[in-house]
């Protein structure tokens, strides 16, 4: 891939999406931001042990919780190029990319020059 078609991403935010079933009431979703893989493993381990209070704060009303997805946001240092990835329930994934930087009007010209000089 040529240099003019690259985006340097600097900041990542990752959220775990949980489906929460309380003892009384309807199921709802809750998101937890994680900063490292250890956070993810810790949360999943506590949920498997049914220690909901350790993950969700006041988890006294939680009858069941399950990981239903991951949401990943990334952006560059100028905040002009963003990528959003959502994976839920193993059923589908979606990705959204801001192509404003990739649609450089000079990219085609640079590609043609590279062909001419054999690079």
Image: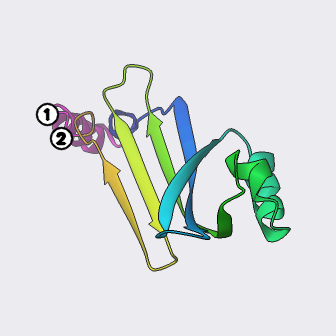
In the shown orientation, is residue 16 left or right of residue 38? left
- Is there any visible trace of residue 75 in the rendered image? yes
List x then y, in percent, for residue 24: 55, 69
Residue that sits furthest to the left in the current view: 105
Q: Is residue 77 above or below residue 98?
A: above
Callout in the foreground (2, 1): 1
Rendered residue at 57%/45% (across/down): 14
Look at the numbered disc 1 and give the secondary structure of its residue: loop
List x then y, in percent, for residue 105: 13, 33
Q: Is residue 21 above or below residue 51?
A: below
List x then y, in percent, for residue 15: 56, 48
List x then y, in percent, for residue 34: 66, 43
Kindly indicate the quadrant of the structure image that contains residue 78.
top left
Residue where numbered disc 1 is placed: 105
- Confirm or deny contact between disc 2 and disc 1 (CB under 8 A): yes
Q: Is residue 100 above or below residue 54?
A: above
Is residue 44 shown in magenta? Answer: no
| Inter-mark Cα distance, 2 to 1 | 7 Å
Q: Main secondary structure of the magenta part?
A: helix
Bounds of the magenta segment: 103-118
Rendered residue at 27%/42% (across/down): 98
Kindly indicate the quadrant of the structure image that contains residue 94.
bottom left
Residue where numbered disc 2 is placed: 108
């Amino acid at each position: 891939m040529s240099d003019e078609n690259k985006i340097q991403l600097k900041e990542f935010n990752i959220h775990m999406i949980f489906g929460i079933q309380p003892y009384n009431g309807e199921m709802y979703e809750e998101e937890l931001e994680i900063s490292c893989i250890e956070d993810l493993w810790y949360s999943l381990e506590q949920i498997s042990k049914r220690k909901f209070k350790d993950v969700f704060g006041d988890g006294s009303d939680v009858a069941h919780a399950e990981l239903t997805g991951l949401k990943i946001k990334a952006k560059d240092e100028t905040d002009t190029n963003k990528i959003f990835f959502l994976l839920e329930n193993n059923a589908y994934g979606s990705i959204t990319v801001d192509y404003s930087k990739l649609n450089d009007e000079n990219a085609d010209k640079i590609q043609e020059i590279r062909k001419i000089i054999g690079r």
